[in-house]
Image: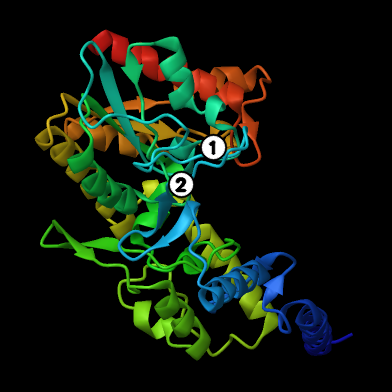
Amino acid sequence: MPLRRKFGLVAFVTLVTVLLMELALSVFILDEGRLGDRPLPPFGALPHPRQQAWLEEMRDDIETDVERQGAGVFDSELGWTNTPYAPESKGVLCISSMGARGRREYASAIPVGVTRILTFGDSFTYCAEVSDTESWQHQLEARQPDWEVPNFGVGGYGQDQALLRMRRILPRIEGNIILMGINVENIARNVNRFRPLYHPRTAAAAAKPRFILADDELELLPSPYESRADLVSALDDGSLLANIREHEYWFEPERLTSKLALARLFHGWQAYARRQPDVLWAASEEEPFRVTLALLEAFKDEALAAGASEAIVVISQRETDLSAARFWQPLCDELDARKIEWIDLSTVLGPAYQKGEALFQGGHLSGRGNELTAIAIEAFLLERL
């Protein structure tokens, strides 16, 4: 067979194969905009059915004038927060009158003879998926009876929201030591304004504030909606994406190829790859890295200015991170350069995980994982006390 005909045959077979793949993938992708459970770009405001279900609940709450209590409640300044909730049933999640997890109430002033450690951060600080008594804060109080460790962590937070919540809480309660939890994944949250655009499979279609850097100084972009009714209205009339597009790092634009299944699959691979924390921590000149470090520096400065003697960053990891190379080392190096003290939980969790201990429950630390966290923080603090 002449070489020209061979090339023509190969080209024809390749074209037919691509067309068949496009047709097959279109059945699974184009109708729903997802491959299995994973949405593909361009991500709309509600890329997953979980968010549509959340929106229906919000509509029902507004129509029936229901004000929710507990974890993840809409907040015009913070996006969402934890509000007081103390049901009579034992074993049910509780939030104190000041917004700390658990039934324990704390006085504004530090009692004589007590060391108070205030804790802020995300779901690894909040201790999601375990009971109040399995949180590392509760276990730390049990290990050191003269310590008080209020838990002001909130699920889904970045350091931007945690910093804003700290600003709200500190005028109401004194602390000798203040801890800021950062999971290595949080770097991506600190440049996000609408959660589904960063995390398309999230359960909540929630908007949030964020900070940008203007001449190397943090500048707050407030949460874009003052009420849950405003948020729901923006989702219903389709204006939300246009409202939050400016300064949304994770916005995925519509492309000419967005109607092609193979192209959407490729763009999806790109989108999820650029969200990986190992990629983000390796890019020290990019916005996620720079904003995150500026937020941690602001945490230190504001905590010390409020009267705390120590401001310490607590670095946590997901289960998959403990099996990876230590890609968050640039974070540790920058904290050292800025004279910010830090605790890396992988030094305790890593060896236990390699031994096969059950340190995770769902996507978060188990009771045992939180116990080891309490032990690590206790040892670190005892050296300074």
Quadrant location of the N terminus in the rendered image = bottom right
Alpha-carbon neighbours of circle 2 within 10 Å: few (<14), some, or many (≥20)? some
Residue in the image at 31% along x and 77% along y: 246
Q: Check disc 1 and report the residue beneath it.
A: 321
The image position of residue 154, as x and y in percent, is: 43, 46
The image quadrant that residue 27 belongs to is bottom right
Residue in the image at 38% along x and 43% along y: 99
- Classify 176 as above or below 288: above
Tag 2 and tag 1, C-beta contact below 8 Å: yes
- Classify 172 as above or below 78: above
Residue in the image at 43% along x and 26% along y: 137
Residue in the image at 42% along x and 50% along y: 83
Q: Residue furthest right?
A: 1
Give the label, 2 or 1, closer to the camera: 2
Q: How is the image coloured?
A: rainbow
Task: Give the amino acid at mark 1.
Answer: Asp
The image position of residue 338, as x and y in percent, is: 17, 35
Alpha-carbon neighbours of circle 1 within 10 Å: few (<14), some, or many (≥20)? some
Observer-nearest of 187 and 141: 141
Q: Kindly identify which numbered label has been placed on residue 243.
A: none
The image position of residue 361, as x and y in percent, is: 65, 35
Marks 2/1: CA distance? 9 Å
Task: Give the amino acid at mark 2.
Answer: Glu
Q: Check disc 2 and report the residue beneath it.
A: 185
Looking at the rendered structure, the secondary structure element under dot 1 is helix
Looking at the rendered structure, the secondary structure element under dot 2 is helix
Quadrant location of the C terminus in the rendered image = top left
* Residue 361 shown left or right of residue 124 in the figure: right
Observer-nearest of 256 and 2: 256
* Residue 239 shown left or right of residue 170 in the figure: right
Say which label, 2 or 1, has the lower sequence index: 2
